[in-house]
Image (cartoon, grey):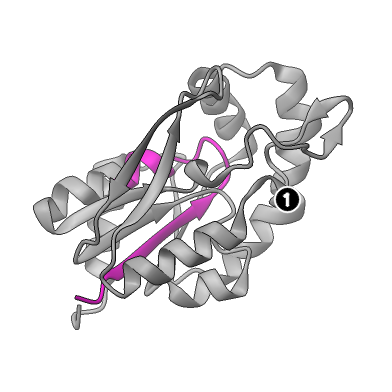
Amino acid sequence: MTSFFIGIAGGSGTGKTALAEELRQYFGKEAAVLHMDNYQRFGEKLRKLYGMKNWDHPEAINWDKLLKDLILLKNGQAITIKLREQKTLKKVKTVIFPPSKIIIIEGYLLFYKTPIRKLINFRIYLEASEDARVKRRSKIKGKGDRYIKKVVLPMHRRYIEPTKKYANLVINTDKSSIKHCCKQVVRHLPNRF
């Protein structure tokens, strides 16, 4: 089995995880969701910005492991991933992630590295106004305003937003429901898969 990869990238608070789950429900048993958050370098020294660990810099991602796992999945092989509890960042458990006909991969920097980008069959970039992203990020992640203003927003402008040009489809989520976004994606997917 060769998996069809749907990639969802975009800034924090744009709805990547929600859209990934909506697409998984739409496709049913044929689909699975892989979260790029599972490839963050927890427990390692991270670059700091204004005295805060910079989880939004490309160096915070274990790109080698992500690439290796995507190649294995693309070739129909299972992978092992470590799931972490978001608030404490402690490893919760290691799980086997089996291959699926459709794998939806979501992550803020997903289109940043060329070898990874080339493996993704259909790339979606979600965008939203800065105000909407800040508001949603504050609700979801519980990070302070200082981290958002000093780290998240500058990293978005520098590393995430420029990857929009690699998308097959760009969706603005300011006023679109996740169900509407899902319908847009399905309409634009290539028929051959």
- Residue 122 lies, in percent from the top left, at 37, 71
Q: Residue at x 73, y 46 (%)?
A: 57
Using the rendered view, name the quadrant where residue 5 is placed.
bottom left
- Highlighted range, magenta: 1-20
Quickly name the residue at label 1: 59
Residue 110 in sight here: yes
Asked if 130 appears above or below 24 in the picture, the reply is above
**Residue at the spot x=24%, y=61% of the render?**
99
In the picture, measured across the screen, residue 187 lies left or right of residue 148, that is left
Disc 1 residue type?
A: Glu
Indicate the position of residue 37 as horizontal and vertical percent values: 51, 41
Q: Residues within 10 Å of mark 1 (few under 14, many from 20)?
A: some
Q: Residue at x 16, y 45 (%)?
A: 25
Residue 15 within the segment the image draws in magenta: yes
User: How many numbered dots are placed on residues in this image?
Assistant: 1
Judging from the image, what secondary structure is the residue with disc 1 in? helix
Compared to residue 97, the image places residue 87 above or below, namely above
Q: Where is residue 70 drawn, in percent x and y?
A: 42, 65
